[in-house]
């Protein structure tokens, strides 16, 4: 059956070309040379039917650690949800607190109000953490970004002070989200489900 080999090769080439042309929206916020980790591999058009999320606060403290340095933030649309990835130097994560807020969001230090696009606001507090190096230089090229993804419309850094880093995500609706931790490099992953 050697006649099947050319057809099998042709089928694999066509499949690879189709996957390469699949639309994928991705936004990267990082310092030059930082890696955002492995890409999310989800077949085009598929849905994450196993998405189990929450709208309640997710809290995981890690007191007593030295601050972890945030070196990259990656945002991308995936089938059924948007994924925001916070990548840190080193091999461990800081503590974190994630929750929706209905109250005003303010920048730490100045107390200035912060507006965010969308109907809801999801806060992500990382502690102990910092988004600057030991000389005070920012480790991220962009700290405010309009994303325009299906669920996450905007991403803004509202605090980088005294061991605390806080982001506000402007979201289309205050829908379910999930938090996971990845290693190699250390990453905190936040998936926000698209509206129904």
Image (cartoon, rainbow, N blue to C red):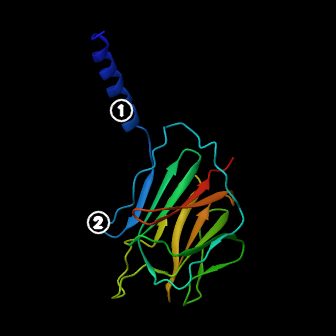
Q: Is residue 168 visible?
A: yes
**Mark on residue 62?**
none
Foreground: 100 or 128? 128
Relative to 142, 44 lies left or right:
right
Q: Which residue is mark 1?
A: 16
Foreground: 153 or 176? 176
Q: In what quadrant of the picture does the N terminus appear?
A: top left
Question: At numbered mark 1, what does the secondary structure look like: helix, strand or loop?
Answer: helix
Relative to 131, 32 lies left or right:
left
Q: Position of residue 156 (x, y in %)?
A: 52, 72
Within 10 angstroms of label 2, few (less than 14), some, or many (20 or more) residues? few
> Could you say which quadrant of the image residue 138 lies in?
bottom left
In the displayed structure, 145 sits above or below 105; it is: above
Q: Earlier in the sequence, mark 1 or mark 2?
A: 1
Q: Position of residue 167 (x, y in %)?
A: 54, 73
Q: Is residue 172 visible?
A: no
Q: Position of residue 23 (x, y in %)?
A: 44, 42
> Could you say which quadrant of the image residue 12 lies in?
top left
In the displayed structure, 102 sits above or below 49; it is: below
> Could you say which quadrant of the image residue 102 lies in?
bottom right
Question: At numbered mark 2, what does the secondary structure look like: helix, strand or loop?
Answer: loop
**Mark on residue 33?**
2
Foreground: 34 or 183? 183
Residue found at x 40% / y 35%? 19
How much space separates mark 1 and mark 2, taking CA atoms?
Answer: 28 Å
């Amino acid at each position: 059956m050697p006649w099947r080999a050319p057809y099998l090769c042709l089928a694999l080439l066509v499949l690879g070309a189709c996957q390469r042309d699949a639309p994928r929206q991705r936004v990267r916020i990082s310092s030059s040379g930082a890696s955002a980790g492995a890409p999310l591999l989800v077949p085009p058009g598929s849905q994450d039917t196993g998405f189990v999320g929450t709208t309640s606060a997710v809290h995981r403290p890690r007191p007593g650690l030295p601050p972890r340095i945030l070196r990259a933030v990656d945002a991308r649309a995936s089938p059924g949800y948007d994924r925001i990835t916070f990548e840190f130097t080193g091999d461990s994560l800081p503590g974190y607190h994630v929750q929706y807020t209905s109250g005003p969001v303010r920048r730490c230090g100045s107390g200035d109000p912060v507006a965010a696009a969308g109907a809801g606001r999801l806060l992500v507090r990382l502690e102990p953490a910092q988004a600057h190096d030991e000389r005070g230089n920012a480790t991220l090229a962009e700290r405010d970004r309009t994303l325009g993804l299906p669920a996450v419309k905007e991403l803004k850094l509202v605090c980088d002070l005294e061991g605390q880093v806080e982001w506000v995500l402007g979201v289309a609706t205050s829908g379910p989200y999930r938090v996971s931790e990845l290693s190699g490099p250390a990453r905190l992953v936040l998936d926000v489900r698209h509206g129904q």
